[in-house]
Amino acid sequence: MQKTLSPFMLWGLGVGYVISGMYFGWNLGLEKGGTLGMAIATLVIMLMYVTFTFSYTELACAIPKAGGVFDYAGKALGKNVGFVAGIAQTVEFIFAPPAIAFAIGAYFNAFFPQIPILASALVVYCLFTALNIYGIKAAASFEAIITVLAVGELLLFAGLSAPSFKTENLVRNAFPNGWSGAFAAIPFAIWFFLGIEGVANVTEETKNPQKDIIKGFGWAIFTLVILCVLVFVYSIGVGGWETIVFKNGISGATSDSPLPLALAKITGDNHVMYHLLITIGMFGLIASFHGLILAAGRSTYEMGRVRNMPTFLGVISGRFQTPANALLGNMVIGIIALLSGRTGELIILSVFGALTLYIISMISLIVLRRKHPQLNRPFKVPFYPWFPILALAIASISLIAMFIYNLKLGLIYFGLLVVSFFLFKVFNTHKTLVYDSTGNS
């Protein structure tokens, strides 16, 4: 694959993977935990992502492979655990885009009611898959541009909301369901940051991965932490958490549009700034949708390349130098998931996959430090071993809480892992990859 990505493009991808989480979905955690419960969950998850990102950067720089956690776990823990990690990563990256595609369709429907939501979602799925097939430089450049627009819109929202901020709106009915509400809010807090790990999946297409990945990951997590705090505080501070959860601002039907609800409280729903927020807000959804498609293609490609998935998925297009087959295969699965109409459940499945990825990758980092001290590590996580241990502990507790509050979906997710592993053991007969001290197989 072509090495064309710069640190700025990596920042655009890292923020772009995630930024839709600032625009929709996270506010539903307020219904579970209130302002304080959601704040506790968000601060803990934020700590997990900061420590995880620094730890994951060490792995990405030491083993710059498109498979991400699949390659790291394979080297540290063997091909069986590597396969499970790869499937978890695939679940995360494949099931998040359909939920975002549906939200994009809803935005289009708000402007053009005659166009069905599902029709718009299917069109954008095909369009952005085609863009990713066309070339990584074009895809990453587009991602950087729309990410800048989406970040600018969030900063504009904070500026417009600040004069109407009132502290009493943060403390009113702040902890309605106690600590159980804080635990139930965890998956919605994760939605603030879900997907940043996808930066590691484009290391093979980065000009200087050992140096540039550090910059891309670092600036991305810094940007996301700042945006998360601004969005959380100012959107709730306008009128209380109920205002950005319920369509009528009191109770009943919930909304996936917290920022427009907050801004409508200030300007009304006919103001030019309100319509600007909705228009540019769609770029935030597109940035995450497009970015996750890109990362998913690399993850699936690597699994196909080593024959842990059908080998045709591991083929690079001779014309475009991109994993076209993997991108098309992911699109087919994503569209099937989209047609199910279960967008909320798709998000939960994606979070299950992400938490599994975090747990296995942190264990892999600790094992690699012990088993392969000679491995070239251009970047080493600070405060080792506390950063990976902290990320591992929070991810493990979050996975348990997710399972308790989403038992049915948890069983479906682990069923997917078990069935996939069984098929892997039955049909996979190739030899385990061996890596040298540079991480090359």
Image (spheres, rainbow, N blue to C red):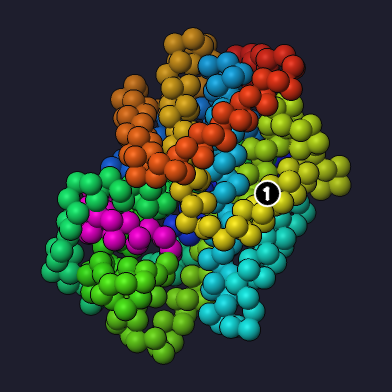
Taking depth in this image into account, of 404 and 265 the one nearest to the observer is 404
The boundaries of the magenta stretch are 22-43
Query: Which residue lies most toward the front here?
Result: 408
Q: Position of residue 204 (x, y in %)?
A: 66, 35
Where is the N terminus found, in terms of image quarters?
top right
* Residue 45 in magenta stretch: no
Say what secondary structure mark 1 lies in: helix
Where is the C terminus found, in terms of image quarters?
top right
Kindly identify the residue that appears in the image at 34 percent across and 81 percent down.
264
Q: Is residue 131 visible?
A: no
* Residue 29 in magenta stretch: yes
Query: Which residue lies most toward the bottom here?
Result: 270
Q: Main secondary structure of the magenta part?
A: helix
Task: Give the number of marks.
Answer: 1
In the image, residue 371 sits, relative to residue 365, either above or below, namely above
The residue to which callout 1 is attached is 333
Q: Position of residue 210 (x, y in %)?
A: 56, 31
In the image, residue 13 sits, relative to residue 215, either above or below, namely below
Kindly identify the residue that appears in the image at 68 percent across and 15 percent down.
432
Query: Is 59 positioned to the left or the right of 298 in the image?
Result: left
Q: Position of residue 349 (x, y in %)?
A: 50, 45
Taking depth in this image into account, of 212 and 170 the one nearest to the observer is 170
Kindly identify the residue that appears in the image at 26 percent across and 69 percent down.
242
Kindly identify the residue that appears in the image at 38 percent across and 48 percent down.
187
Quarter of the rendering containing residue 7: top right
Query: Is 188 positioned to the left or the right of 73 in the image?
Result: left
Q: Which amino acid is tagged 1? A: Ile
Q: Position of residue 106 (x, y in %)?
A: 54, 72
